[in-house]
Amino acid sequence: MSYNKRSFELGSKRSVIREIFEYSKARKAEIGNDKVFDFSLGNPSVKPPEEVKEAIVSILNESDPTVVHGYTSAQGDARVRKAVSDNIAARFGVKMSPDLIYMTCGAAASLSICLKALLDKDDEVIVFAPFFTEYSVFITNADGKVVVSMPESKTFQVDVADFESRISPRTKAVIINSPNNPSGVVYTKDTVEKVCEALRRKSCEYKKDIYLIADEPYRELVYGDVEVPYIMNYYKNSLVCYSYSKSLSLPGERIGYIAVNPEADCAQEIYLAVCGAGRSLGYVCAPSLFQRVAARCVNTKVNIAPYKENRDILYGNLTDFGFECVKPDGAFYLFVKSPDVSATAFYEKAKKYELLVVPCDDFGIEGYVRIAYCVDKSAIVGSLPYFKALAQDYGL
Ligand code: PLP
């Protein structure tokens, strides 16, 4: 056998979410679509804003097709990068430059590129549990080592003492994801400040740069008056991985960007390393049409009211039924403590009630499940009697 063993293992081992997705399809075929409550996938249920369609149509009508469908510069079209850069400057007061923007195929590509750009072999990357499972894949692929920092048990904010204890002379980067998948928690200004202070202290102690990578696909999905601190305003050696997958409901179009903080030490060199990493991974010239759509829609975002309504119904009812949930301020996930010792046992029992939730052991925390509430409201409302019966089954 001459193929790569790590790649084979990745390709042949189905993720839990994939398993549930396959089960869901089979079960729906068996008993009917509306009888199965599938809360497994983080696929936006709100349609893209009208402006997206208008932008697509007008770009296609007005532009030379060989340009619109042609290659752009490897790092993205210059005018698109300018639009993104101006938007960051206007929204967050950062002195951004188009020459520090790299257009990508979504946050997954952004993260892979940033890690490849920054890491040397066996460098450590700290992630805050609970975390998006693919981080381990991206970090390992960049020859790095995953180090997990556990959260405060009630709020799921960062446990700063735990975090600081994980920073070692091998730490090269930290990934922070807010609003968080899978907890829905938004890290407060206080949390972000403390994380950054700890990083500055340790950078000084170890006499090395440690980078903070903000993974931000859910930045625009926050409910109420909640602020998502912009990392560049708190820590200079930082990069932002942004995606339009959720903010414009375009996950299948694969579009996002990396922004390097202009205040970072050697910002231009870091950007060149980003360009080199993009090149070596083959992530060059992000989808041309959707680069242009993103540039026209920099100030547009999806209607988040349906997500908020789903959150309120689900959180209110599940806590009434006796489930312990983290109140999510953003994203579209509810993180529920398993009444069973094992999250997998809870998942199996929920399945008997036709409720498909995701056991979160692979997200770095045991004993929790994730409910993706980016579904139609009718599914949320329809699932409530089943959640109630499930709670009674556990004697809650
Ligand atoms: N990061 C987090 C936390 C996510 O939840 C996701 C997707 O769900 C991604 C990154 C990847 O997003 P994209 O579709 O932009 O590649």
Image (cartoon, rainbow, N blue to C red):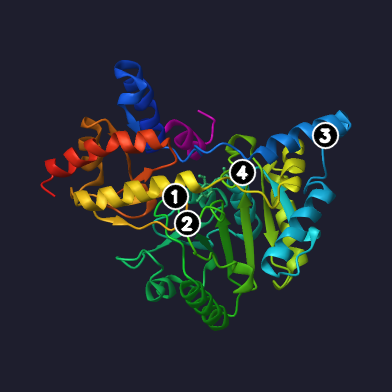
The amino acid on which the numbered mark 3 sits, given as a three-letter code, is Val
Q: Where is residue 239 in the image (x, y as percent from the top left)?
A: 64, 62
Query: Is residue 360 in view from this perspective?
Result: no
**Residue situated in front as seen by the camera: 268 or 292:** 292
Within 10 angstroms of label 4, few (less than 14), some, or many (20 or more) residues? many
Reading the image, the residue beneath label 4 is 248
Q: SS class of the residue under badge 2?
A: loop
Name, please, the residue furthest toward the top.
30
Q: Do the residues labelled 4 and 2 touch (CB within 8 Å)?
A: no
* Highlighted range, magenta: 1-15
Query: Is residue 95 in view from this perspective?
Result: yes
> Quadrant of the rendered structure where residue 213 is?
bottom right
For the residues marked 1 and 3, what is the alpha-carbon distance in whole angstroms?
Answer: 36 Å
Question: As drawn, is 198 to the left or to the right of 25?
Answer: right
Task: Tell me the number on the disc at residue 308.
Answer: 1
- Mark closer to the chain start, 4 or 1: 4
When the figure is inspected, residue 383 is found, relative to residue 201, above or below; the finding is above
Q: Which residue is drawn at 44% across and 41% down?
A: 374
Question: As drawn, is 167 to the left or to the right of 343?
Answer: right
- Mark closer to the chain start, 4 or 2: 2
Q: Does the magenta stretch include residue 137?
A: no
The amino acid on which the numbered mark 2 sits, given as a three-letter code, is Tyr
Reading the image, the residue beneath label 3 is 68
Reading the image, the residue beneath label 2 is 223
- Mark closer to the chain start, 3 or 4: 3
Within 10 angstroms of label 2, few (less than 14), some, or many (20 or more) residues? some
Q: SS class of the residue under badge 1?
A: helix
Mark 1 or mark 3, whichever is nearer to me: 1
**Residue situated in front as seen by the camera: 20 or 92:** 92
